[in-house]
Image: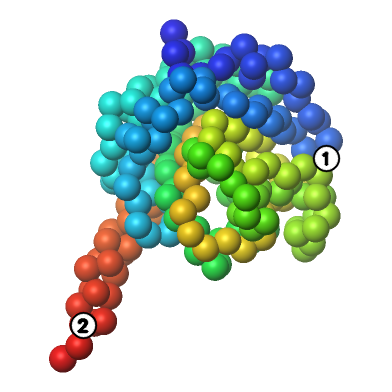
């Protein structure tokens, strides 16, 4: 049973099929749970994606992760996208901060079947950092839909060669959970190795930079 997720709202949201398959569900997280989950959200001071086993968080956030891995959540996506995900591996990563190089247009890697993004920012007044689904890979203003990354909003799409997306630059705190079903266990292992190596590098950099900044 999913306590934090509004699965009925997800079921009631039509799937857009062109130019690629996607759906957007505002308020997918139960409003009563948002403050609790955000209070338990991982404390991330570096830009980039971190595997959930590389960060620390509280019980309300763990409960949300458990629900994302649950059968109820998966079955709704199988129904929506008409695809069997029962034996597909999953990976969950989190972001806490956005840097000037983030948001460049891309389609996601071929190892991903479906990408689910859940935003956890209490409010969003900035023009940058709003994810845009795009018609092409070379124009950030050729917009199909734009998703402000406000708390509880969900965006999901089926990865394809034209599932272009990106956002205008933003620097600062930007909380987002990314959940993916992947094509194979081998691809999951590769993705996790890459994420773990990146997380280790960021931790090392965070330790080194302050010491370099200190005066002699």
Check the picture and name the quadrant holding the C terminus: bottom left
Rendered position, 8 above or below 132? above
Rendered position, 87 above or below 58? above
Q: Residue at x 46, y 13 (%)?
A: 2
Q: Quadrant of residue 152?
A: top right
Q: Residue furthest bottom?
A: 216
Q: Residues at badges 1 and 2 in contact (C-beta under 8 Å)?
A: no
Check the picture and name the quadrant holding the N terminus: top left
Q: Which residue is mark 2?
A: 214
Q: Is residue 59 visible?
A: yes
Q: Is residue 107 visible?
A: no
Which is in the foreground here, disc 1 or disc 2?
2
Q: Residue at x 74, y 33 (%)?
A: 21
Task: Kindly report the distance in space between the C-alpha atoms of the residues bearing marks 1 and 2.
Answer: 52 Å
Would you call the spot at circle 1 few (<14 residues within 10 Å), some (14-19), or many (20 or more)? some
Q: Residue furthest left?
A: 216
Q: Which residue is mark 1?
A: 19
- Where is residue 41? Give x, y as percent: 36, 38
Describe the element under mark 2 as helix, strand or loop. loop
- Where is residue 173? Give x, y as percent: 46, 54
- Where is residue 209? Give x, y as percent: 27, 75
- Where is residue 181? Give x, y as percent: 52, 32
Please give the label number shown on residue 175.
none
Q: Residue at x 67, y 56 (%)?
A: 127
């Amino acid at each position: 049973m999913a306590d934090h997720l509004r699965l009925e709202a997800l079921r009631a949201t039509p799937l857009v099929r062109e130019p690629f398959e996607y759906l957007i569900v505002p308020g997918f997280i139960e409003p009563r749970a948002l403050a609790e989950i955000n209070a338990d959200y991982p404390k991330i001071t570096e830009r980039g994606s971190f595997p959930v086993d590389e960060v620390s968080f509280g019980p309300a956030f763990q409960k949300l992760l458990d629900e994302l891995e649950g059968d109820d959540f998966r079955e709704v996506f199988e129904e929506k996208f008409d695809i069997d995900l029962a034996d597909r591996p999953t990976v969950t990563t989190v972001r806490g901060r956005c840097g000037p190089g983030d948001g460049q247009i891309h389609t996601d890697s071929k190892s991903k079947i479906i990408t689910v993004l859940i935003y956890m920012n209490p409010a969003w007044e900035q023009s940058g950092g709003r994810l845009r689904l795009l018609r092409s890979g070379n124009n950030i203003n050729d917009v199909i839909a734009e998703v402000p990354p406000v708390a509880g909003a969900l965006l999901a799409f089926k990865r394809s060669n034209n599932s272009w997306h990106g956002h205008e630059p933003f620097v600062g705190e930007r909380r987002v959970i990314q959940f993916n079903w992947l094509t194979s266990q081998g691809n999951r292992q590769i993705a996790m190795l890459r994420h773990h190596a990146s997380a280790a590098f960021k931790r090392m950099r965070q330790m080194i930079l302050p010491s370099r900044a200190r005066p002699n």
